[in-house]
Amino acid sequence: MTDRGSYQPLTYFQLMEVSLRELLVEKGVVTDAQVDETLEDMRRRGPERGARVVARAWTDPEFRKRLLADGTAACEELGLDVPALRLVVVESTPEVHNVIVCTLCSCYPRMLLGLPPDWYKSRNYRSRVVREPRIVLAELGLEVPGDVQIRVHDSTAEMRYMVLPLRPPGTGGWSEERLASIVTRDCMIGVAVPEVTR
């Protein structure tokens, strides 16, 4: 509905969602209340869970190794459920900067980062970041030095990527909570880096 109350037709995907929901409720697979509860839970999630994972990896070298070897299992150690997915965590270093995308749709580690931003789902980002990542990152405000390699990781329906960003200098001795406070959603997508404000 618009501000004037006029009817706006459903988009193709909205129509598909409504149809699927109604069918599942009609067949008794789920209830309307269960669907509403799940959607509300998704809306409440933010990047705090992922930031907690990053902060732990920055402060615990053994956890970091486990996270890079099996992201799903490492997150479950922290009580974070990664249902039916393989989570691959890629580590940015002084030599390599990682960025994630889903070229087919918008697969994204929602359970750790919350809902994806609109630009992540856009055709523009999905097609261009693979072909010209340095330019796209600059347009998003991140200048990656020319001597740093950029690796683009493409998520799939069964596998999600998350970036373990490079820990910024000047954060030695910080608590996990303080470290987590500088890790944003965009840092874990790879279109930004954690910053220490003075």
Image (cartoon, rainbow, N blue to C red):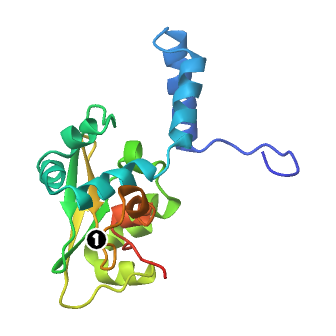
Q: Is any part of residue 103 visible from this angle?
A: no
Relative horizontal placement of residue 142, taking residue 162 as reference (left or right) = right
The structure residue drawn at horizontal position 18% and vertical position 74%, both measured from the top left corner, is: 93
- Residue 83 lies, with reference to residue 51, above or below; the image says above
Q: Label 1, secondary structure: give it.
A: loop
Relative horizontal placement of residue 154, taking residue 61 as reference (left or right) = right
Q: Which residue is mark 1?
A: 167
Most foreground residue, 94 or 160: 94
Disc 1 marks which amino acid? Arg
- Residue 7 lies, with reference to residue 152, above or below; the image says above
The structure residue drawn at horizontal position 46% and vertical position 53%, both measured from the top left corner, is: 116
Relative horizontal placement of residue 42, taking residue 57 as reference (left or right) = right
The single residue placed furthest to the top in the displayed view is 28
* Total tally of numbered discs in the picture: 1
Considering the image in quadrants, where does the N terminus appear? top right
Most foreground residue, 161 or 22: 161
Q: Is any part of residue 194 visible from this angle?
A: yes
The single residue placed furthest to the front in the displayed view is 173
Most foreground residue, 149 or 122: 149
Rendered location of residue 98, percent (x, y):
24, 69
What is the quadrant of residue 77 in the picture? top left
Relative horizontal placement of residue 182, taking residue 64 as reference (left or right) = right
Rendered location of residue 134, percent (x, y):
30, 82
Rendered location of residue 30, percent (x, y):
49, 15
Q: Residues within 10 Å of mark 1 (few under 14, many from 20)?
A: many
The single residue placed furthest to the right in the displayed view is 4
- Residue 33 lies, with reference to residue 158, above or below; the image says above
Rendered location of residue 24, percent (x, y):
49, 17
The structure residue drawn at horizontal position 11% and vertical position 49%, both measured from the top left corner, is: 69
The structure residue drawn at horizontal position 36% and vertical position 60%, both measured from the top left corner, is: 175
